[in-house]
Amino acid sequence: MDCCIKLLILVSFANMVLGGEWSSCSRTCGVGIMQRTIPCQINDECNETRKEFRACNVKRCPDGNADFRSQQCKTYGEELMPFINKSDPCKLLCSAPGQSPAQKGLVVDGTRCSSSSGVCVVGECVPFGCDRVLGSKRTINKCGTCSDLCVQLTCKFKNSSSNDYYTTLPSESTNISIALGSSSCSFKDINDSTKSLHFSSDQSVISLSGTVFTISNNELTTEGPLQSPVTIEVHCLKSSHKIQCNYHMSVYIPYDEVEIANFYEWAVGESFTPCSQTCGRGIQTQEIYCRTYNTHERVPDFECTNNDLSKNGLFPATQFCDQPACPSEWTHSDWTHCSKSCGGGDRMRDVSCIQVIRDGVQPIQTPGKCDSETKPASLHECNKHPCHNHWHTGDWSMCSVDCGEGIQGRNVTCRDANGNKIHNHNCSLQAKPYKKKLCTGDMCIHKWIKSNWTNCSVSCGEGVQTRQVNCTKNGTAVDDSVCLENIPIAKPAKERTCQGPCCNGIWAVENWLKECVALGCHKEGVQYRNVHCIHNGRTSEGNDHIKCNPATEPSNTQGCYMTDGCNPEWFPTDWGYCSKTCSGTQTRTLYCKLGNVTLADEKCSYAKPSMVQTCGPKCLVSEICEAQFCHKDELPPCQKQCCEYCKQWQLLPLLRYNFCERPCCKGNLPGQDTGCN
C-alpha cells in the first residue's frame, strides 16, 4: 500500500484529528466500517492525504442471514461459493462447483478476515477485539469476559471424614480442572444449591449449575461459568495431597468505571532470549515481558511485580541453540555441608574435566585434557570459629490465611555447641532471629451473593419483594463489613416494591341452598351457595375473578346434618369395659334421637336394643381356682372339688373354716386336665 494512504485506526475520540465528513457505514449489522480523508500534516512522511477508519453498526445480524462473504459472491452468480486464501484473506475469491476460485476484487470493508477476530479494511486485515474497538487485539479471556481481569486460582480440598475430602467452587468460576493424580482417589458426589448427584463408574458427563462437567482419566473439567457455588467430594484410600484443583475468576473492575491503564499483565513476546551458552548447545526461551492490560504497551517489569500478577498460565516456547564446541574445562559440584558447625571442619565437592559439544555435555575421562594449574580445590576448611552457644531456627509454618495477608511462624531456640537446647538467656537476645513474618496467600475474591426475589407480598396493588444478600470471601460467607470494605460498589438492595394485579372488585354471596347433600339420614353432609366477584357493576366470569382479592374470598360451602324425612332412631354409646377376664359382662347406654336432638325413649318406634352382653372367654376350673385361695366351705361343688384335690391343705385352728394352703392350678386334679361345668 502507498505510504500516503495509511490505515489510521480510530481507538478513541480523544485522539481524532480534523478531517472531512465520515462516509456511510459499509454494513447495517455485523461490523461496518466508516472512513474519511485526513489532510497530511506538517512533518508527515507523505505530502498528499491519509484515510481514517472506525467501526460502526457493531451488532449481531438477524438469525437466518447468509454468511456475508457468501452474499458478496452471489452478486456475481447464484451458484458461486466463497473461498478464503489464508495468506490474503481480504481478497474476494469465488468458485463454481468443479472450478478453481476466481478473484472478484476485495471484500467489503468489515468482512471477517477468516476464523480470526480481525476484519478487512481496504484490503488489509485489521485486528478487531472483543471490546468492539477497531485495532484492538483484546480477546475473550479464560473467564469468558472481555473487560474484567481474569486470574487463575487454586482450590484446596478439606478433610470431611477419615477418607473423604471436599472443596467448594464459587459461582462464575470458569475453566475448572480437578486432577486426582492417583488411582487411590475417586470422585464421590457433586452438588449445588438445587440438587446433589452421585458419581458412577460409567458416567462421563454431568450437568449441574448451568454447565456440563466432563470426567476423563480421573480428571473433572468444565468451561463454566458456574451459576451457583458447587461442592465436590472425593473419596481417597490414601492422603489427598496429590489432588490438583485450578479455576479462573474475574476481578470485577469494569473498564467503563475504573481507569484500567494502571493494570498490567505478563505476556509472551515473539523474540527469544539470547542463547544460554556461548559454546556448545544451549537453550533459548521466548521472552516474557510486562505490558498494559488494555493497550498491550510494553512497560518495565517492575510494574507487573509490584502488582503481584503471576506468570502462571504463560507457556513460552523453548528451543535449542548450537554454538561452536567449547574447550575442555574444569567443572565441579556444590560444596557439601560443613562436617562441623564450629571449631573447624571440612566440606568437599567433586571436580571433573569436561568438554561441551553440540550434542550435549560429555565428561572426559583423562584429567590431563584440562590445565592442572587451574583445577579447583575439592576440599575446603570451614567453620573455624570457636564453638559457642547459638540461636537455632526451625522451618517456617504455612501461611495463616488462604488469601490476603497473613503470618508465618517458626521455632527459635538457644542451643550449645553440641546442639542441645538450653535456656534463652544463654544466647544474645539482640541477635535473636525473628519468630514471625508476614506472608501472602492467594488473591481474595469478595462478592455479594443474592437469592431470588420472593413473590409479591400482595395479590393486588403495591406490595414488597425481599431477598437474601450475603457477603462471601472466596466462596465462604463472612460479615457484610468485609465486602463493604473491599468492594467499591454498594451492597445490593434486599427489598423492593412490586405491583400485584388490579383487584378493585367486591365479593357477593347468595343464600345457602336448603338442600343438605349427604349419604343418608343422620349423616354429615355439605351445603352450597354461589359466590360472585362484582367488578364495574357486573358479575365477573372465568379468569375475571382476579379482579377481586382472593385472600378475602368467602367460602361457598358449609357443613350440615341430614334430618329432613328422617324418623327418630336409637343411638348407642360404645360398650364399656368387660367386668372379668373370663365369663364377664359389659354394658352400654342407648338414646332416642332425631338428628342432634335427644327425645324420650317412647318416640323411637322399634324395640330398644340390648344394653348388656357377655364378654371374655368361658372360664376353666384352673382359671377359677387360680384367681384366689380356695375357701372350701363357701365354694360351689365344682370349685370345692378343685380345692379338695389341692396337694396339701391345713386347718387353721383360729378360724372356723378350712383353707387350702395354695390355689388349685391346672393339672392338679388327678386324672383330668379340663374344667368342670
Image (tube, rainbow, N blue to C red):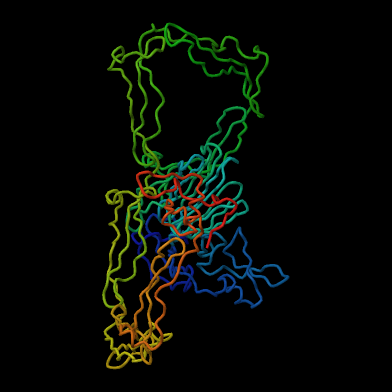
The one of 236 and 398 positioned closer to us in this rendering? 236
The one of 584 and 554 positioned closer to us in this rendering? 584
285 versus 366 height, above or below: below
394 versus 446 height, above or below: above
351 versus 76 height, above or below: above
Identified at 59% across, 17% down, the residue is 330
Farthest residue, direction right: 98
The one of 219 and 65 positioned closer to us in this rendering? 219
Q: Is residue 480 left or right of residue 102?
A: left
> Is any atom of residue 268 visible in this view?
no
Q: Is residue 112 left or right of residue 605?
A: right
The one of 456 and 103 positioned closer to us in this rendering? 456
Q: Is residue 667 left or right of residue 77?
A: left
Identified at 58% across, 18% down, the residue is 331
Residue 321 location (% of width, % of height): 60, 34
Identified at 63% across, 67% down, the residue is 93
Residue 623 location (% of width, % of height): 48, 56
Residue 629 location (% of width, % of height): 42, 50
Q: Quadrant of residue 310?
A: top left
> Is any atom of residue 477 visible in this view?
yes
Residue 461 location (% of width, % of height): 27, 77
Identified at 48% across, 67% down, the residue is 31
Q: Quadrant of residue 573?
A: bottom left
Tally of numbered discs? 0
Q: Is residue 378 left or right of residue 344?
A: right
Q: Quadrant of residue 540?
A: bottom left
